[in-house]
Image (cartoon, coloured by chain):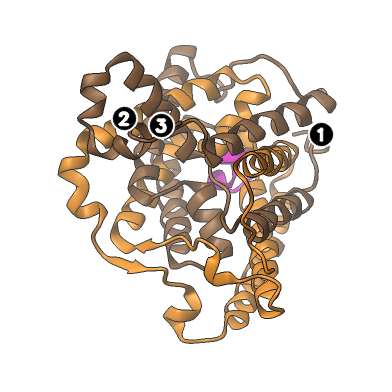
């Protein structure tokens, strides 16, 4: 395993922590990722099925607003994509690929990526955020929410691997 | 004027891009665009995720409360993540399963996609589908979703101690974990 391509996790974690601290200090809020993905989902499905989507009470916070795309979380996600892309390009870590566990078929990987993604998307809405918005941001704020989420996530993550060891090994 | 600051919309969105940039850069450079590294912790072979995560939590947490204690930041104007005990416990539990199955979480899927991983794009489409499913099922879930509301509860409120007691306890636990992780990684290195 060639780890030297990346920064030390403690260095990356420090930069991530300082970035989060800067958002607290300047904007009075934390980081997030899943909210912007929900916004994009609400907007794109609304443009396809306006009647059906406008009946969804939960999506009204994303759809029934003036200029919904003028949104902090969406711009944060755009920045995230640019930052990751720049990091990967500069260090020649960018490569178009389809990543999967060793020995896994492409079809199985399509299913795990999509169904696992669905679980995450659903779970993040239920928890009011994901690893960024609840675990990282809430964790640093010492919010009970963040620590409940972190503990529950690691617990079921380990259990899942115990039952389905071959997903990534 | 104390932080956080009221800024205009254009500046606010510009800052979001800048913060997002460093967010994405630290994820990618930490190796968190790679689903093998992301899931490594669950196989006890690569502890990058908890190392990055708990380092970031300690740096940002200590910084937040230090700035507040020095009265350089008005913490009452920082949006603290509200606690809804059971939905967040259930959400975290479902999230852990999805994390292992897909190999990503939302932020790292975006980071993975930005490094050229098409499976991460599929995971992001799944995340969208999961949000849609939540919105469709919301009338059934709403009662549970708003249950066990504990407001902006923090660990120092819960334990009735000073925030530095919590931060120091977390730092000691994280330090112990980092030590054990380094030891385990060296032992399992081939």
Q: Is residue B42 magenta?
A: yes
Q: Label 2, label 3: how many angstroms apart (C-alpha)?
A: 15 Å
Mark 2 closeness class: few <14, some 14–19, many ≥20 residues within 10 Å: many
- Chain letter of mark 3 equals A
What residue is shown with label 2? Answer: B132
Q: Measuring 47% from the left and 46% from the top, which residue is drawn there? A: A130
Q: Colour of chain B?
A: orange
Q: Label 2, label 1: how many angstroms apart (C-alpha)?
A: 37 Å
Quick one: A131 or B151, which is closer to the camera? B151
Q: Magenta span: helix, strand or loop, mainly? A: helix
Provide the residue span drawn in magenta: B38-45
Mark 3 closeness class: few <14, some 14–19, many ≥20 residues within 10 Å: many
- Chain letter of mark 1 equals A
Q: Measuring 28% from the left and 31% from the top, which residue is drawn there? A: B133
Assign the N terminus of chain B to one quadrant of the image: bottom right
Quick one: B179 or B1, which is closer to the camera? B1
Quick one: B143 or A148, which is closer to the camera? B143
| Residue A116: assigned label | 3
- Chain that the image shows in brown: A
Answer left or right for B43 relative to B182: left
- Chain letter of mark 2 equals B
Are circles 2 and 3 on residues that touch, CB within 8 Å?
no
Answer left or right for B59 relative to A61: right
What residue is shown with label 1? Answer: A5
Q: Is residue A125 magenta?
A: no
Q: Position of residue A102 (x, y in %)?
A: 57, 23
Q: Looking at the image, is A34 positioned above or below residue B185?
A: above
Residue B32 position by quadrant: top right
Q: Position of residue B33 (x, y in %)?
A: 64, 33
Q: Secondary structure at mark 2?
A: helix
Answer left or right for B54 relative to A72: right
Q: Looking at the image, is B8 positioned above or below residue A97?
A: below
């Amino acid at each position: 395993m060639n780890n030297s391509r990346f920064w030390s996790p403690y260095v990356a974690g420090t930069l991530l922590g300082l970035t989060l601290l800067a958002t607290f200090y300047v904007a009075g809020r934390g980081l997030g990722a899943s909210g912007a993905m929900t916004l994009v989902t609400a907007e794109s499905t609304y443009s396809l099925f306006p009647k059906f989507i406008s009946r969804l009470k939960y999506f009204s916070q994303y759809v029934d607003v003036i200029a919904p795309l003028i949104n902090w979380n969406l711009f944060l996600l755009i920045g995230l994509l640019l930052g990751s892309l720049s990091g990967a390009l500069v260090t020649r870590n960018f490569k178009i690929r389809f990543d999967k566990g060793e020995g896994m078929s492409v079809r199985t990987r399509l299913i795990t990526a999509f169904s696992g993604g669905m679980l995450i998307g659903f779970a993040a809405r239920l928890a009011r955020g994901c690893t960024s918005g609840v675990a990282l941001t809430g964790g640093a704020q010492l919010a009970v929410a963040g620590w409940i989420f972190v503990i529950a996530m690691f617990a079921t993550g380990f259990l899942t691997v115990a039952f389905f060891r071959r997903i990534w090994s | 004027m104390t932080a956080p600051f009221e800024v205009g919309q254009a500046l606010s969105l510009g800052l979001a891009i800048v913060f997002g940039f460093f967010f994405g850069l630290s994820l990618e450079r930490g190796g968190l665009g790679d689903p093998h590294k992301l899931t490594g912790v669950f196989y006890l072979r690569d502890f990058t995720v908890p190392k990055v995560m708990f380092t970031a939590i300690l740096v940002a947490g200590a910084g937040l409360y230090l700035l507040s204690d020095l009265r350089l930041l008005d913490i009452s104007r920082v949006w603290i993540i509200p606690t809804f005990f059971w939905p967040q416990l259930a959400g975290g539990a479902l999230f852990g399963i999805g994390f292992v199955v897909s190999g990503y979480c939302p932020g790292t899927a975006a980071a993975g996609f930005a490094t050229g991983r098409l499976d991460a794009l599929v995971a992001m489409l799944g995340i969208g589908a999961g949000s849609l499913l939540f919105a469709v099922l919301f009338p059934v879930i709403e009662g549970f979703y708003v249950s066990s509301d504990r407001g902006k509860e923090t660990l120092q409120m819960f334990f009735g101690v000073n925030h530095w007691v919590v931060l120091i306890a977390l730092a000691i636990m994280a330090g112990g974990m980092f030590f054990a992780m380094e030891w385990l990684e060296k032992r399992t290195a081939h």
